[in-house]
Every structure is written in structure tokens, then in C-alpha cells.
Amino acid sequence: MGCVSSKKKLSKSDLEFLEENTEFTKDQIIEWYEGFILDCPNGELTKKKFIQVYRQFFPNGQAEAFCTHIFRTFDADNSGKIDFKEFLMAINITAKGNPEKKLKWAFKMYDIDSNGSIDRQEMLKIIESIYDLLGAGGSQNASNGMNPSRDPDDTPETRTSQIFAVMDEDKNGVITEEEFIRGCMSDRVLYQMLTADTGDPDR
């Protein structure tokens, strides 16, 4: 741990920004930073490293596709790398954010082409990547309403159709951010599934 002092320091402006814009304390931010800089001495997290870390949490599945979507959402400036500020802002939303903030972040992940709405192909791609991530074991997915191994009719395609039946209120073939948030807030299983959260959106 003694080598931390010789590595990149967290700038005062970044520290102040994160104190103002996250729910982490100054000490927590510094602790997160020290861990981040140990793993990423140059201050940037590559997609390859991100996938390596994420894969540890889902040893039975294929993490690459889902991680690519998450990485794209974390990488706010589209640089192909995640700096500490981007990393902690995303962690703050996914770990500490209120339900609406989590849903706004999740919507950005599903809206692959960033045009402000989710079409069926975009939804299908993310759902397929979640099924790949969960693998065939089914143990991790029971908590969020997904269990592709148990029911042969439960495929990404059928799941996508079910989601659109609930969320696409005006039946125009796309889901807006407002429809996405309303649909998740009114359906606990959808909320858990689409945000990978085991809590209740009312909490």
C-alpha cells in the first residue's frame, strides 16, 4: 500500500465535484480512489479490465456482452476508457441512487444508439446479454425474476415481447424514457430485472 503516494493523486476539483454530486463522504471517495488507482495505476479503467473484474461476480455465465453495454454507459465521454470520476458517478447511481436515478441510468444502457427511445432490437440485445451473463445455472437470476433455465418458453424474445406489452403505452414500437420509468416503477419484477436490483422500487 506504500506505493499509493507515488501514483496519481485525486485532484482537489475532482474530489469537490464528487463530494457535491455523490452520496459518498470525502473519506469514502478517497478510499474508493486508492483502490481504483491500485488496479488502474494510470487512472483509467479499460474495457478489458472491466470485463475481467465483472466476470468474477458471474462465474457461470458469459459476461462480455453485458459488460460492453454497461461499460458504454459508464464511459460518459466515449473515450473507450473509464476515469475515476466516471467510475464513481456510475457506482453512486447503481449502488446508492434512488429508484428514478437508477432507471434513468438503466434507460441509457438500453438506448444503445442514444436516440432517446428503446426499440425492440435494442431491448432484445440487452436481454440476450443478461441471459448470457446469468448462464444456465439459474441460481443468480431467481432474485430478479429471470430464470431462463427453468422454462424453455422463457427466451429473450418472449421476455422482450412481454416488456413491450407492459411498457409501450402508445403501441408505437418504441419505449421512451418516461414509459420505461413508469413501467418499472409500477412493476416490481420489471424493476428488479431491468436494473439488476433485488430491492423494491417503493423503498
Image (cartoon, helix red, strand yellow):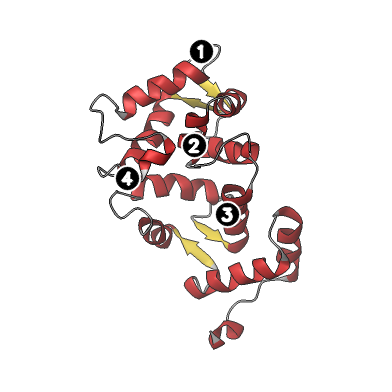
For numbered disc 1, what is the local secondary structure? loop
**Residue 60 location, x and y as percent?**
28, 51
Residue 152 quadrant: top left
Q: Which mark is residue 172?
A: 1
Separation of marks 1 and 4 at Cα, in angstroms: 36 Å
Side of 140 relative to 90 (left or right): left
Q: Gap in Å between the C-alphas at discs 3 and 1?
A: 33 Å
Discs 3/1, front:
3
Dot 4: what SS?
loop
Instruction: Give the residue at mark 3.
Output: 91
Q: Is residue 157 above or below residue 1?
A: above
- Identity of the residue furthest to the bottom in this view: 2
Q: Answer whether residue 93 is visible to the viewer in this image.
A: yes
Which marked residue is nearer to the observer: mark 1 or mark 4? 4
Q: Looking at the image, is mark 1 or mark 4 earlier in the sequence?
A: 4
Q: Amino acid at mark 3?
A: Ile
Name the kind of residue labelled 1 in the image.
Asn
Name the residue beneath numbered marker 2: 192
Furthest residue toward left: 152
Between marks 1 and 2, how big is the CA–CA gap?
25 Å
Query: Is residue 112 in view from this perspective?
Result: no
Labels 3 and 4: the sequence-earlier one: 3
Residue located 53% across and 55% down the image: 79
Q: Residues within 10 Å of mark 3 (few under 14, many from 20)?
A: some
The secondary structure type at the circle numbered 2 is helix
Q: For label 2, count other residues whose C-alpha is less than 10 Å away and answer few (under 14), some (14-19) or many (20+).
A: many
Q: Of tags 3 and 4, which is closer to the observer?
A: 4
- Please tell me which of labels 3 and 1 falls first in the chain: 3
Residue ID for mark 4: 139
- Amino acid type of the residue that numbered disc 2 sits on in the rendered structure: Gln
